[in-house]
Structures are given as structure tokens and as C-alpha cells.
């Protein structure tokens, strides 16, 4: 995962990638078509299937999601990594020192 990925997903409210992660946070093991339908449902502007496919493949390459054409889900390893980063940020703000897990 890129070092700035956590902040990207936390800050960029209109990102297609963030919308995809929101869909996969509620449902899992979705196909590209199902992700596209959920991303576009009730949202405007409409997003093309090709744009969703490209974003899903980028998220997969970044390690944020896992799976194949018919069963994408948020990567458990990525979730743990995000959780660890959040704990580190909280510790930094509270003045605590956390040592990385080995």
C-alpha cells in the first residue's frame, strides 16, 4: 500500500476509489458488475463500467482489495495495516511511543 493511501481515502470524499471501498465495506465478494451497479445506484454523475473496472484493478494492485473477477472484497491485510496506521497516528497525537509489530 502506498504510504499516503490512508490519507487519500480519508480525505477525498468524491473519489471513485473511496466509493468502491464504501460499497465493499458493506458487501463483500462482489463482481465488477455488482460493484458498478452499487457505485452508480442513486449517485450522480453516473460512472462508466470501464472507470469502475480501472479503479478496482488499481485498488487490487495497491493491495486494498483482494479477489478476482467474481469475488472482490476488501483485503484483510490492508484493513490491519490501516488499523495499525491509525493507532500510530493516535499515539503520536497523544504523545505515546508505539513500537512497530514484528
Image: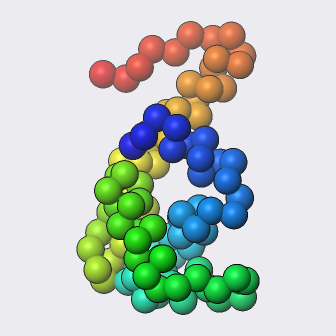
Percent of width and height locating residue 84: 49, 33
Give the side of residue 95 with respect to residue 33, left or right. Answer: right
Would you place residue 2 above or below residue 19 in this image? above
Whether 76 is drawn above or below 56: the answer is: above
> Which image quadrant for residue 57?
bottom left
Residue 100 screen position, x and y as percent: 41, 20
Query: How far across and how far down the image is residue 37, in percent?
Result: 54, 89
| Furthest residue in direction left, as rendered | 68
Can the viewer see residue 42? Answer: yes
| Vertical arrangement, residue 75 with respect to residue 102, above or below | below
In the displayed structure, 80 sits above or below 49; it is above
Between 6 and 53, which is closer to the camera in this rendering?
53
Residue found 36% across the figure and 72% down from its top? 72
Residue at the spot 38% in from the left edge and 83% down from the top edge: 31
In front here: 45 or 33? 45
Given residues 96 and 38, the one toward you in this image is 38
Q: Position of residue 23 (x, y in %)?
A: 56, 73
Residue shown at 65%/48% (left/top)? Answer: 10
Report the quarter where the C terminus lies: top left
Using residue 19 as the reference point, say whether residue 101 is left or right of it: left
Taking the image as shown, residue 73 lies to the left or right of residue 5, namely left
Identify the image quadrant of the N terminus.
top left
Regarding residue 25, the answer to whether it shows in the image is no
Q: How many marks?
A: 0
State which quadrant residue 54 falls in.
bottom left
Tell me the residue at 59%/47% (across/down).
8
Give the color scheme: rainbow, by chain, secondary structure or one colour: rainbow
Amino acid at each position: 500500500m502506498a504510504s499516503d493511501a490512508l490519507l487519500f481515502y480519508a480525505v477525498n470524499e468524491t473519489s471513485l476509489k473511496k466509493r468502491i471501498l464504501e460499497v465493499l465495506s458493506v458487501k463483500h465478494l462482489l463482481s465488477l458488475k455488482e460493484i458498478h451497479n452499487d457505485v452508480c445506484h442513486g449517485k450522480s454523475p453516473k460512472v462508466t463500467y470501464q472507470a469502475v473496472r480501472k479503479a478496482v484493478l488499481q485498488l487490487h494492485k495497491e493491495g486494498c482489495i483482494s479477489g478476482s473477477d467474481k469475488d472482490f472484497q476488501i483485503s484483510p491485510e490492508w484493513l490491519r495495516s490501516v488499523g495499525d496506521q491509525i493507532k500510530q497516528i493516535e499515539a503520536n497525537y497523544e504523545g505515546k511511543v508505539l513500537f512497530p509489530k514484528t
